[in-house]
Image (tube, rainbow, N blue to C red):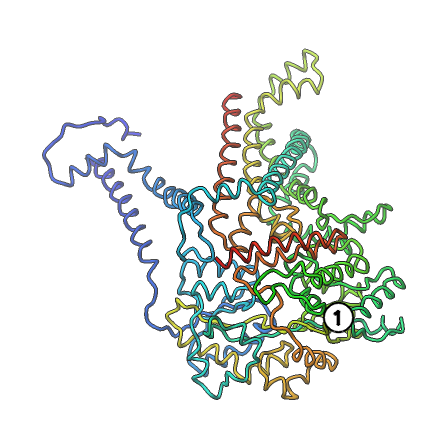
């Protein structure tokens, strides 16, 4: 009898565990419907984020809200959004995103809340103060879906000591740049004349300023592929040749900015074209052996002039599925207020506000030549640094292929033709 | 167990519901006890697999919540006729797995034989050999990336000392795959050593002694006694390692990033499917590649387990 009782008890326990398990599974899905006092913010690893984190206690004190922060690397952030937003999560309120990389995709998928009314609701915060280019990039089909936070332009990083030694002026045209790179490389075989990103996808943005300088673009006015135009081919040839002939020995074809920057800051290259927002990596003596001898200049001019990109690299948006949009907006309004933008810009992260740029305090912490270069670039800059499509990730790989072929000394014209065909196919598919 | 001695079936009795439940539970206890595991398997394996299979038959892209059309086997046709990315990725997956596996088995066997007999300092040697196994693959990837850096890496500096010109290692279009295979061998040979060593220590010494008395050479004893006796263990090692090697992702992603490098030089099926899903947001195609990959692994495992049964 006792045995049987035990047995029945055992069965009941199993049944209870099963039932309990499934109940627990059901209750896990429900969210908090009411607006919460906690704002859940997802940010990327960036100097901007570090400055924001320092000031978050002030925001919490001011508003009485609590900020719950998730901070991730760029790739992890993308993967996270991909999974969570796809699943329709309401557990992200504020999201830091890359308007040019993911903006169209997110907006089209309905992940980003419409902020059009909110941006014009507070005259003091002043939406009109934001630069036009960045604002274009955070808008989608006449709706504002994000607020730009960080802007960047491509500039020329160079070594003042090497130029002096060679008796050279700072190159103002791409032709001069090539001649100077050649001369320095020949005089110092251990030092590369020129370095830049080499990875198929990461190089695309830095290549774009060369492309515009030669008079080309990724997509023409009719929305067709333009990567096999004579101008584009010249640009591909030029970028590839600069690294193939005057670049570092044994150059890797996987370099993004950390690797290329490392070569420059360890004294391995005379010239380097890169985003201005990364300048502290080169000027900070803790990271850079060339901190004392680094100079900055505007992007050298090609046949079509000096045409660097001038883009918002990051922005803040609100998750459409969030139940806490009002408080999420409070966070965005605070993080992009004039005071915060000025403070962060002074710490070395270029912001999107005209008033901060025209304020002498906004550039006082920048090296003088860099501030001058930024000013020039802001005037003649182009508002995109990659193809403006929905699936940017795929497009970058397609149009980046001839860059890598050029770097490894292959047939660039053939690669550009192949890329053109693939890119046209891609654009046609996307238009459907 | 006392429970098993109970009569399997009882006469139906008109009793209360509790009694009926108890009887039912008693008669179906094999199902009842297996149920949690079966439900677990269903939720965690069959559902994702079924969902992936479903996605592979649709043109789902952009967002999985967006509307998608059922397009039958169109994705399969597209993938199977893709000579640019898919088939090279299949080839790389098999080259990576087979070369790494072969070297790991041979090397693992040699090391296991060396460690088989007790010797002085045995503990320390064993610990040292097992170290790569406990390191996380991403950390291992980062470490080797630094060592193999073409300009400042330790590997090229060593070659320089020997007067050998610098090599591109991970950055070269044609040297990247051999280099990642090398790293995989470095990391996973210890696992093969552990498995084979466990097998070796459980072997009876009598056949070996008998052969020795009969005058068999060391090689003959290894070839005709140790290896055949160890065969079930060897196949277990091959099975575990090959499944693992086929699925390698972390090491490849940590060393070469998305797409397996600018020329897709180390892009295996796993890396390709990840890129389709996370970089291209093409969930239909990505699922198709994963289903095909799954079928390939099942086929490979089927062949191996059959071989194992033959041996046993």
A71 lies left or right of B184: left
Q: Residue at x 50, y 83 (%)?
A: A127
Q: Chain of mark 1?
A: A
Can you give x and y, in whole percent of width and height, for residue B160 in the image? 84, 49
Above or below, A223 relative to B160: below
Q: Residue at x 52, y 83 (%)?
A: A337
The furthest residue to the top: B214
Q: Quadrant of residue A192?
A: bottom right
Front residue of this view, candidates B17 and A371: A371
Above or below, A160 relative to B118: below
The furthest residue to the front: A222
Q: Residue at x 46, y 49 (%)?
A: B284
Q: Quadrant of the N terminus of chain A?
A: top left
The furthest residue to the left: B14
B223 lies left or right of A244: left
For label 1, count other residues whose C-alpha is less than 10 Å away and answer few (under 14), some (14-19) or many (20+).
Answer: few
Can you give x and y, in whole percent of width and height, for residue B154 in the image? 77, 52
Front residue of this view, candidates B193 and B168: B168
Residue beneath label 1, please?
A303
Q: Quadrant of residue B2?
A: top left
Count of marks placed on residues? 1
Q: Residue at x 88, y 62 (%)?
A: A186
Q: Quadrant of residue A307?
A: bottom right
Can you give x and y, in whole percent of width and height, for residue A404 in the image? 70, 55
Can you give x and y, in whole percent of width and height, for residue A155 in the image? 71, 72
């Amino acid at each position: 009898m006792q045995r049987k009782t035990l047995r029945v008890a055992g069965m009941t326990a199993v049944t209870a565990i099963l039932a309990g398990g499934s109940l627990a599974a059901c209750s896990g899905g429900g969210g908090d419907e009411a607006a919460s006092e906690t704002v859940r913010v997802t940010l990327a690893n960036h100097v901007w984020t570090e400055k924001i984190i320092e000031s978050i206690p002030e925001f919490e004190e001011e508003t009485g809200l609590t900020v719950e922060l998730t901070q991730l690397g760029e790739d992890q952030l993308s993967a996270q959004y991909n999974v969570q937003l796809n699943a329709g999560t309401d557990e992200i309120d504020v999201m830091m995103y890359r308007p040019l990389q993911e903006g169209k995709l997110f907006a089209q998928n309905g992940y980003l809340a419409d902020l059009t009314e909110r941006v014009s609701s507070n005259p003091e915060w002043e939406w009109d103060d934001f630069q036009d280019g960045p604002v274009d990039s955070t808008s989608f089909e006449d709706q504002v879906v994000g607020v730009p936070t960080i802007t960047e332009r491509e500039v020329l990083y160079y070594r003042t000591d090497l130029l002096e030694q060679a008796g050279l002026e700072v190159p103002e045209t791409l032709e001069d740049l090539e001649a100077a790179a050649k001369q320095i490389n020949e005089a110092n075989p251990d030092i590369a004349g020129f370095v830049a990103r080499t990875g198929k996808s990461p190089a695309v943005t830095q290549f774009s300023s060369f492309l515009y300088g030669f008079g080309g673009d990724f997509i023409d006015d009719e929305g067709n592929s333009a990567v096999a135009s004579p101008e584009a081919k010249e640009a591909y040839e030029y970028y590839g040749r600069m690294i193939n002939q005057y670049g570092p020995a044994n150059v890797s074809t996987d370099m993004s900015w950390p690797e290329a920057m490392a070569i420059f800051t360890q004294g391995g290259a005379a010239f380097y074209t890169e985003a201005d927002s990364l300048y502290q990596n080169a000027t900070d003596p803790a990271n850079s052996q060339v901190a004392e001898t680094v100079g900055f200049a505007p992007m050298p001019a090609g046949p079509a002039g000096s045409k660097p990109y001038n883009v918002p690299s990051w922005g803040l948006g609100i998750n459409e599925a969030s139940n806490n949009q009002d408080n999420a907006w409070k966070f965005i309004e605070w993080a992009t207020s004039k005071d915060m933008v000025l403070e962060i810009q002074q710490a070395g992260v270029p912001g999107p506000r005209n008033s901060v740029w025209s304020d002498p305090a906004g550039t006082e912490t920048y090296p003088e030549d860099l501030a001058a270069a930024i000013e020039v670039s802001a005037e003649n800059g182009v508002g995109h640094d990659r193809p403006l499509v929905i699936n940017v990730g795929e497009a970058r790989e397609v149009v980046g292929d001839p860059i890598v072929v050029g770097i490894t000394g292959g047939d660039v014209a053939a690669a550009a033709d192949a890329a053109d065909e693939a890119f046209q196919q891609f654009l046609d598919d996307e238009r459907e | 167990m006392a429970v098993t001695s109970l009569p399997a079936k009882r006469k139906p009795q008109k009793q209360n519901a509790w009694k009926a439940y108890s009887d039912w539970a008693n008669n179906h206890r094999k199902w009842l006890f297996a149920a949690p595991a079966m439900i677990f398997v269903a939720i965690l394996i069959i559902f994702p697999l079924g969902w992936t299979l479903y996605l592979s038959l649709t043109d789902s892209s952009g967002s999985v919540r967006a509307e998608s059309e059922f397009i039958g086997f169109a994705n399969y046709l597209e993938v199977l006729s893709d000579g640019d990315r898919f088939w090279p990725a299949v080839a790389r997956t098999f080259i990576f797995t087979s070369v790494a596996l072969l070297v790991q088995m041979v090397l693992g066997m040699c090391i296991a034989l060396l460690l088989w007999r007790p010797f002085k300092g045995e503990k320390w040697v064993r610990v040292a050999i097992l170290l790569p196994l406990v390191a996380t693959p991403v950390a291992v990837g980062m470490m080797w990336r630094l060592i193999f850096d073409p300009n400042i890496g330790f590997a090229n500096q060593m070659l320089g000392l020997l007067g050998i010109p610098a090599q591109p290692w991970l950055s070269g279009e044609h040297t990247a795959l051999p280099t990642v295979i090398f790293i995989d061998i470095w990391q996973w040979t210890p696992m093969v050593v552990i498995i084979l060593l466990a097998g070796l220590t459980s072997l009876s010494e009598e056949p070996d002694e008998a052969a020795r008395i009969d005058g068999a050479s060391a090689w003959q004893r290894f070839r005709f006694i140790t290896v055949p006796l160890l065969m079930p263990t060897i196949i277990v090692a091959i099975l575990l390692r090959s499944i693992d090697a086929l699925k390698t992702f972390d090491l490849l992603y940590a060393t070469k990033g998305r797409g397996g490098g600018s020329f897709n030089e180390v892009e295996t099926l796993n890396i390709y499917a990840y890129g389709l899903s996370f970089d291209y947001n093409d969930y239909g195609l990505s699922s198709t590649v994963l289903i095909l990959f799954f079928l390939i692994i099942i086929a490979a495992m089927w062949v191996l387990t059959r071989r194992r049964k033959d041996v046993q």
